[in-house]
Amino acid sequence: MANYENILSQLFEIIKPSVKDGRQLEEDTDLVADLGLDSLKVMTLVEEVEDRLDISIPLNMLAKVRTIKDFALQLQQLTEEG
Amino acid sequence: MALFDKFQTLVEARQELAESGVPSINVVMEKIISPTEAIVNGRHTILAGTNNYLGLTFDPNCIDAACKAVHDQGTGTTGSRMANGTYASHVELEHDLADFFGRRDTIVFSTGYVANLGVLAALAGPGDVILLDADCHASIYDGCRLGGADVIRFRHNDVNDLQKRLKRLGDRTENGLILVEGIYSMLGDRAPLTDIAAVKDEYGAYLLVDEAHSVGVLGENGRGRAEEAGVEDSVDFIVGTFSKSLGAIGGYCVSNHPELELIRYASRPYIFTASPSPSVIASTRAALAAMRARPELRQKLWDNAHRLYQGLQETGFALGPEPSPIVAVRLESKAEALTLWSGLLEHGVYVNMVLPPATPNNFPLLRCSMSAGHSTEQVDRICQAFATLRNVSLKSQTA
């Protein structure tokens, strides 16, 4: 799970500037319900992750993502497939 | 969670609009006077947000053709293209379009939205991969979702980003379909199609161009952005609509790939909906003939587009990146957009108001679209209304 931990820490770094109220980010933080990210912010976030990890994230994969953990697990799967 | 709880954000947005003092954003065209005029809220109004690019909705030949078709063939087909809904005129229109585009085959769909749904859902399924420009229309996104392919977005009009993503795909590019639009509907900017076609050819992917806003608008013969850019041979599929330059409703896909015919059998949005009514098909055929015979309409459209773009630019508005029949006025806040939009209506000018998240870059837009049917005087009156309201706004800010 080293890869997962690495991805998770990178996600925390990337998402942190989008958090307005200084909220602590956790694995189970919900991107929309807890952080209030709208669809445009989510897509900006996705682009940042793609650039950082040098991957392309299919939009259909995002349908399964609600929390940061969901996102990290999907990214782990994607990087392992790649 | 109760069934309707998901609508709470919409309830709040509507409440915010109601409290802003704007009477209603649901405009009703009480009486249509011409391609560029209507009665709205009891007021004679210039229509500058209709996508009626060539102004053919009241063309006498189109109206006569539609009337004759109603009398001869009835009001509707009452059936799918795959059942009883393919009349001789549907097939003739497909031949007309294939001839116009110089392509082997055409499929006519019931709307432009359905054309994208029908083509994309059938073309790109599980295991395939779509690379789409981030600013593509909702019908393209929805078609992608219906098909079940992997959908990868690239940054708007960024050929390097597209190339980077193609490179990452490796062998999968042979199952790759690139989706772009000729002119993008919100900002009116064109796709860099020469470069996109070169990248597509280099990586061996397929290319589909949605020319909804560019047929009748771009190219020496009005065939759209691919013609203008000189890359028609590299474009595998062109999708378009009858509801803009052709003044009716419906959609189509043209291609040289013989497999296009098979989409009729694989496309649920084609199979499970009623076909366009005979009057729509007849007026579309007449409009296509008019578009081919009267290139001066395109010239007049562009004259109007340049005049509006220049007029609004001189007034100091932030506009889309290039002059185009779609002139997008970029505003800083939703409140500013609402005030200006309702003020324009009071001045007898209708434009489209588009609010985030439906806009690129999260800015509210007042989206104007020009028509060959606009007179120079009408374009000047539109510019004047914008200028008057801007002056009022600036004065209130400095007061």
Image (cartoon, rainbow, N blue to C red):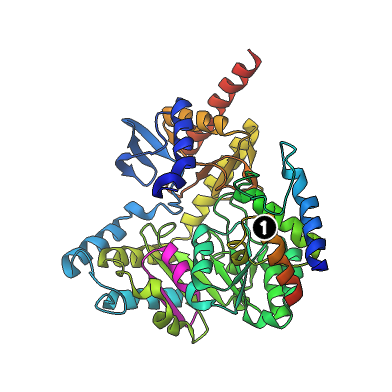
Crowd around label 1: few <14 · some 14–19 · many ≥20 (10 Å): some
Q: Would residue B276 be seen by someone viewing this image from the given angle?
A: yes
Extreme residue in the bottom direction: B258
Left or right of B98 on screen, residue A65: right
Extreme residue in the top direction: B399
Image point 22% across, 60% down: which residue? Answer: B67
The chain identifier of the residue carrying mark 1 reads: B
Q: Which residues are magenta?
A: B101-120
Which one is nearer the viewer's eye here, B280 or B362? B362
**Would you name the residue on which mark 1 appears?**
B156
Membership of B105 in magenta stretch = yes
Residue B363 higher or lower than B392, as above or below = below
Left or right of B282 on screen, residue B128: right
Q: Secondary structure at mark 1?
A: loop
Which one is nearer the viewer's eye here, B115 or B375? B115
Give percent across and percent down for residue B188: 58, 51
Give percent across and percent down for residue B123: 52, 78
Instruction: Give the amino acid at mark 1.
Output: His
Total number of numbered discs in the rendering: 1
* Location of residue B244 (image quadrant): bottom left
Give percent across and percent down for residue A58: 64, 67
Q: Would residue B157 be seen by someone viewing this image from the given angle?
A: no
Give percent across and percent down for residue B160: 76, 65
Q: Quadrant of the C terminus of chain B?
A: top right
Image point 71% across, 68% down: which residue? Answer: B195
Image point 49% across, 35% down: which residue? Answer: B382
Membership of B106 in magenta stretch = yes
Image point 76% across, 71% down: which residue? Answer: A79
Left or right of A16 on screen, residue B1: left
Which one is nearer the viewer's eye here, B81 or A65? A65
